[in-house]
Image (cartoon, rainbow, N blue to C red):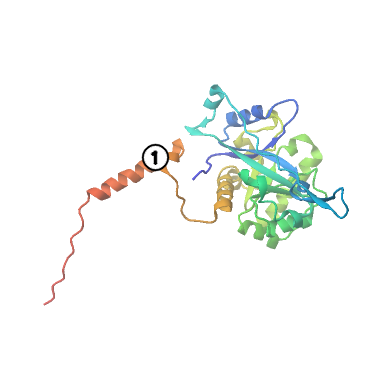
Amino acid sequence: MNTVQGFCDFNIPCPCSPSTTLKEVVLRAVKLGYSAIAINTTIEEDVLINTKKKGNKKNEVKEEKKDVPPPLKLKFTEEELNLFKVHGKNVKILHRLTVMLSDPVNTQKLIQSGNTKKYDLIAVCPTTTAAFLHAAANMDIDIITYHPTETKELLRFTRKHYRQATDRGIFFEIPYSHMLRDSSNRKKIIQISHLYHTVGKSRNVIISSGALTPLELRNPYDVANLGLLLGLSEGEARSALNLSGRSVALHAVTRKTGKCVSFVAETDKLDPEEQWKAKEITDAEERLAGEPEPKKMKMETA
């Protein structure tokens, strides 16, 4: 199964700052020790809605369709690919789609159609309380994120709404780069993170960067220390960077294939770090083939 391991940063925005390139931001994240990175493409909800437009003829109505941009794929040189090995394992680059959500009724059926299937992770950024509650209870997504400048009002939700989302495997994202840019955004990020702690005891929380430049990225251990300011304990802060990231990736896989307890794949198509599994299966078959069949014992009665 194509899962992730180690520290994760599931929010590298595309496009990034004009003063740098997306490739430089990704390479900086690799050097800092992140083993799973998601390139985030943000769209408005209007892109997923087919708007009706009047044609030239009388009573003629045409549907105007907007295309979802395809995932951006980066090309690296051989020297750069050598950096993509953390403790002997290749770094995984995923693709994430984030939808700015204000009226979720129209986008609920369209969010899993079209080019959205090409993305590994699906996230929404609710800008209103109604959109947040609908996304937590009904939408088939992986992440609910927060943007301090795009959110129109203070989000209000109860423990029931929070549990509805966590029971369905949805994770809440805290982007820490907004705290580095502006003091007002810092207050909003701390406020929403403490709201997650008060209402849901910081369950299913992940911390991502949302960095537009390489200078906004921080070491995973520094981010874990920052989690103490966000209402997380030491164990919860580390889990928000590694274990929770793995759970998000698994939830994305089961969202596409359906919930299952086993996953079948050809041994030739396994990743290099997973080739040991095929060898273990072959050794187990050889051991079973060499063992003699057990003789049946008969019980004698007097």
Instruction: Name the quadrant containing residue 76.
Output: top right
Judged left or right of residue 264, residue 96 is right
Tell me what residue is drawn at x 22 percent, y 51 percent: 291
Residue 162 position, x and y percent, is 68, 58
Q: Is residue 229 visible?
A: no
Q: Label 1's element?
A: helix
Mark 1 neighbour class, 10 Å CA radius: few under 14, some 14 to 19, many 20 or more: few
Q: Is residue 140 visible?
A: yes
Image position of 12 with respect to 111: above or below: above
Residue 123 position, x and y percent, is 68, 47
Quarter of the image with the C terminus is bottom left
Query: What residue did someone put label 1 on?
Result: 276
Which residue occupies the foreground of this view, 175 or 49? 49
Tell me what residue is drawn at x 52 percent, y 25 percent: 82
- Amino acid beneath label 1: Trp
Image position of 301 with respect to 260: above or below: below
Which residue occupies the foreground of this view, 247 or 272? 272
